Image (tube, rainbow, N blue to C red):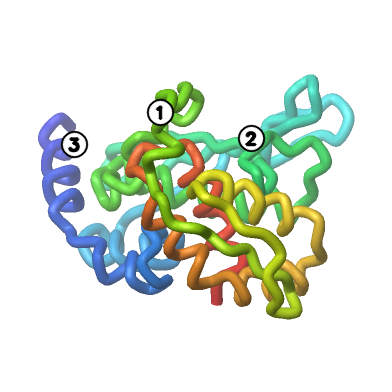
Amino acid sequence: MSANYKDIWETLNKVSMDKIKDKKGKFDYLSWTDMWQEVQKYFPEVDYEFREFDNPTYGSLDCMVYPDGSASVHCTVTIQGVSRSMWLAVTDYNNNAKKDWNVVDVANTKMRCLTKCMSMFGLGAHIYRGEDLIDREVKPGLNAVRSAKAYVLMSIDGKKASSHKTTNDYINAFRKSVADLSEDDRKKLFSKNSSNVEKAYNDLGENDQDKDAYDKLIDAYSE
């Protein structure tokens, strides 16, 4: 069994993910379909399952529900007898735990969790590097030093809505604007700001706490 752990990791960790990341501009993004297809090339016997939980109110659910109403999904991937498990919270567009979630939120989170779980075998593991630092405080002054460029937030009608001097200020303003819109209008706003979104994203540091939340926006609204 120990040999399988080592062989699987060394095989998948050597796979270049550049062609997959480039599928959505320059964003460091991996979709579950791309990950699944890539794993199949090396280990076609790969399998996965999502854990189910007994809920006192609704019976069996494919997510764990916590006392405050938030939820998480749990996935296990198995390759050649080696199993890895991963969990992921159901979150909103600001990366906060979502308490008013529905079946679509759970379904989307499950597929992101599957992607993350597959990375535990080495494929695309570098994409998640620094995620363990997401709840740590950003060093004072780092936000101001990151970029001296101005980031312009455009409205849906293509007019200038606001201007921001730092990357994180722009990202926070964009996320708040998106959160208040309908699904169709979110896509329109994303389209109007695509160039500035990409510029701001690329200016973020590799371990920046905003990257994970920004990935979710990109996944949902980039075309």
Secondary structure of residue under mark 2: strand
Instruction: Look at the numbered discs 2 and 1 and tell me whether their residues touch, using CB distance below 8 Å.
Output: no
The one of 21 and 80 positioned closer to us in this rendering:
21
Direction from residue 114 to residue 162 in the image, left or right: right
Residue at screen point 76% across, 67% down = 183
Q: Residue 38 placed where, x, y %?
A: 29, 64
* Quadrant containing the C terminus in the rendered view: bottom right
Secondary structure of residue under mark 3: helix
Question: Which image quarter: residue 182?
Answer: bottom right
Nearer mark to the viewer, of 2 and 3:
2
Label 1 to label 3: alpha-carbon separation: 23 Å
What residue would you read off at disc 2? Answer: 72
What residue would you read off at disc 3? Answer: 5
Q: Amino acid at mark 2?
A: Ser
Q: Amino acid at mark 1?
A: Asp
Numbered mark located on residue 132 in the image: 1
Direction from residue 146 to residue 57 in the image, left or right: right
- Mark 3 residue crowding within 10 angstroms, few (<14) / some (14–19) / many (20+): some
Nearer mark to the viewer, of 2 and 1:
1
